[in-house]
C-alpha cells in the first residue's frame, strides 16, 4: 500500500468536495493536523474512522487503500498484510523487552545475593602463656567454614599434655572447640542453621577469642586469647582478570616425596644414631602416638625435635629457650625473664629485641645463644640446610602489608 498515493487521493477528493482540511476534520472528529498528515503520506486514518471518511468522500474501502477509483482489492490486502507485520513486530519487541527485564532482574537478584558475600579471614592472637595462629574462617551465604589454627605454648612450664581444651568463642557463645587431643579440625555449617554461625557471630568476627583450658600446678585454669581477624579474601569485584600461571606445571608430588624422604632420614638418623628418644605423645583415646616428637638431654639442656615441621627447641633449667626450623638460620630466643630476641645464627647478628628492631644484645644472652648455636650445629650436623644469603622476613611487617 502506497501511503503517498493514498494521501494525494484523499486530498484530491477533499478539494473536489470543496472542503478545507478543518471542515473534513470536523466531519470525522479529528484535527486538521491529522488530515494534513494523511495527505502528505505520513500516516493513515485509524480503522475506526475509515468508514466515515469513505462515506464523506463517496468512495469504497478498496478505493481508499488503492489510492484511486478501482474495483481491485489489492490495496485492502496489502493494508491487512502491513497491519499484520506491524502487530508481529510489536509482539516481538514486547517479548524481547520482557526477556531483557527478566534477565536484568535475575542478574540483579544474583548480584545482590552474592556480591561481597564470600569472606575469608586468618585469626591470630597472643596471651601470656600461649600464641594462637593460622585459624582460617570462611563465611558465605552458602556455607560457613572454620579450620582450627595452631596453639603454641610460650611458657615452658606448661606441657602440651597440660592443655585440655581449646574453644573458639564469640561473646561466650561456642563456635567450635576440641578437648583431649588438641590437633584441630574443620567445622562447617550450612547457612541458615545458625547453630554455630548466626548473624550476630558472623558480623562480629573481631570479637572472637580462644579460651584455653589447661592444668598448671595441679590447678585447672583458663586463659583468653584475643584474636585479630585479618581479611584475606572477598568476592567484591565485578570482573576478575585471568591469573597468569606462576608454576612451571611440574608435578609437585615429586617435591613432596623428596620432603617425606628427607623427614624420614632425619627421624631415623636422630633416633638410631644420635641418641634421641621418641617422646610420649598420646592420641585422643590415650594410646601412644609415635613418630611425632624426639627429645634428648645434653647436660642441663633438653633438645626437642618436632618431626612434621622440622622444628627444634632447646631449653635449660634456667628457663632459657630457643627454637627454629631446621632449614631456617633465624632463631628465636627467650631468657625466661621477659627478654626475647630474633637472631641470625650464621651472621651472629640480632634482628629484634622484644618484638622491636635492634642491633645490640646483652652479653649474657649473647653467650647463651652462642652455646645453643654450638649445640645445634653439633647435634644436627649434616641435617641443617642454612642459606647464607637468606633475608629475614618480619612476620609483623608482613601482616601489615
Image (cartoon, rainbow, N blue to C red):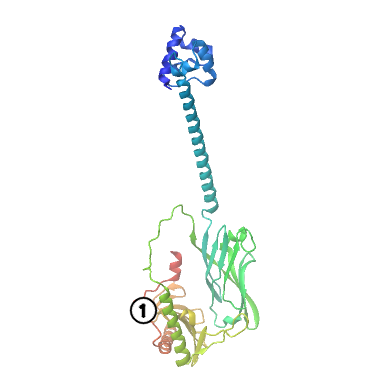
Quarter of the rendering occupied by the C terminus: bottom left
Among the 4 quarters of the image, the one containing residue 387: bottom left
From this view, report whether residue 137 is shown above or below residue 51.
Answer: below
Q: In the picture provided, is 201 more to the left or to the right than 270?
A: right
Which percent across, then down, holds residue 381? Answer: 40, 88
From this view, report whether residue 96 is shown above or below residue 114.
Answer: above
Q: Is residue 330 visible?
A: no
Residue drawn at 58 percent across, 60 percent down: 202
The residue closer to the viewer here, 296 or 66, is 66
Quarter of the rendering occupied by the N terminus: top left
Which percent across, then down, holds residue 360? Answer: 40, 78
The residue closer to the viewer here, 116 or 398, is 116
Per the image, the residue denoted by label 1 is 387
Among the 4 quarters of the image, the one containing residue 374: bottom left
Kindly give the residue lying farthest to the left in the view shown: 389
The residue closer to the viewer here, 242 or 301, is 242
Residue drawn at 44 percent across, 72 percent down: 356
Kindly give the residue lying farthest to the front in the view shown: 71
Which percent across, then down, holds residue 264? Answer: 46, 84
Which percent across, then down, holds residue 206? Answer: 56, 62
> Mark 1: which secondary structure?
loop
The residue closer to the viewer here, 312 or 217, is 312
Mark 1 crowd level (few <14, some 14–19, many ≥20, 10 Å Cα): few
From this view, report whether residue 39 is shown above or below residue 385.
Answer: above
Amino acid at each position: 500500500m502506497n501511503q503517498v498515493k493514498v494521501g494525494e487521493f484523499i486530498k484530491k477528493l477533499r478539494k473536489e468536495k470543496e472542503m478545507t482540511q478543518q471542515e473534513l476534520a470536523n466531519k470525522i472528529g479529528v484535527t486538521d493536523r491529522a488530515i494534513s498528515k494523511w495527505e502528505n503520506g505520513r500516516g493513515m486514518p485509524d480503522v475506526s474512522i475509515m468508514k466515515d471518511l469513505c462515506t464523506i468522500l463517496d468512495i469504497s474501502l478498496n478505493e481508499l487503500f488503492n489510492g484511486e477509483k478501482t474495483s481491485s482489492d489489492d490495496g485492502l490486502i496489502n493494508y491487512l498484510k502491513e497491519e499484520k507485520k506491524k502487530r508481529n513486530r510489536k509482539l516481538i519487541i514486547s517479548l524481547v523487552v520482557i526477556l531483557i527485564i527478566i534477565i536484568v532482574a535475575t542478574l540483579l537478584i544474583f548480584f545482590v545475593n552474592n556480591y561481597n558475600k564470600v569472606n575469608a579471614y586468618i585469626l591470630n592472637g597472643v596471651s601470656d602463656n600461649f600464641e594462637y595462629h593460622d585459624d582460617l574462617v570462611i563465611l558465605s551465604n552458602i556455607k560457613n567454614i572454620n579450620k582450627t589454627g595452631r596453639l603454641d605454648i610460650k611458657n615452658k612450664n606448661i606441657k602440651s599434655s597440660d592443655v585440655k581444651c581449646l574453644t573458639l568463642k564469640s561473646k561466650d557463645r561456642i563456635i567450635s572447640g576440641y578437648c583431649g587431643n588438641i590437633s584441630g579440625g574443620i567445622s562447617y555449617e550450612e547457612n541458615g542453621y545458625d547453630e554455630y554461625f548466626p548473624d550476630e557471630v558472623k558480623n562480629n568476627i573481631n570479637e572472637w577469642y580462644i579460651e584455653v583450658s589447661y592444668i598448671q600446678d595441679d590447678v585447672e585454669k583458663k586463659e583468653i586469647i584475643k584474636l585479630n581477624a585479618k581479611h584475606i579474601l572477598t568476592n567484591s569485584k565485578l570482573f576478575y582478570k585471568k591469573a597468569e600461571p606462576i608454576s612451571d606445571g611440574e608435578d609437585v608430588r615429586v617435591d613432596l616425596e623428596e620432603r617425606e624422604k628427607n623427614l624420614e632420614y632425619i627421624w631415623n638418623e636422630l633416633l638410631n644414631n644420635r641418641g634421641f628418644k621418641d617422646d610420649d605423645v598420646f592420641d585422643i583415646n590415650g594410646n601412644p602416638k609415635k613418630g611425632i616428637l624426639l627429645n634428648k638431654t645434653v647436660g642441663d639442656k633438653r633438645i626437642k625435635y618436632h618431626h612434621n615441621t622440622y622444628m627444634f627447641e632447646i631449653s635449660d633449667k634456667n628457663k632459657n629457650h630457643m627454637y627454629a626450623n631446621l632449614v631456617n638460620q633465624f632463631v628465636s630466643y627467650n631468657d625466661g625473664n621477659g627478654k626475647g630476641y630474633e637472631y641470625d645464627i650464621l651472621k651472629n647478628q640480632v634482628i629484634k629485641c622484644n618484638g622491636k628492631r635492634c642491633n645490640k644484645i646483652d652479653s649474657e644472652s649473647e653467650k647463651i645463644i652462642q652455646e645453643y648455636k654450638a649445640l645445634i650445629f653439633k647435634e644436627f650436623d649434616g641435617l641443617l640446610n642454612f642459606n647464607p644469603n637468606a633475608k629475614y622476613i618480619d612476620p609483623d611487617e608482613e601482616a601489615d602489608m
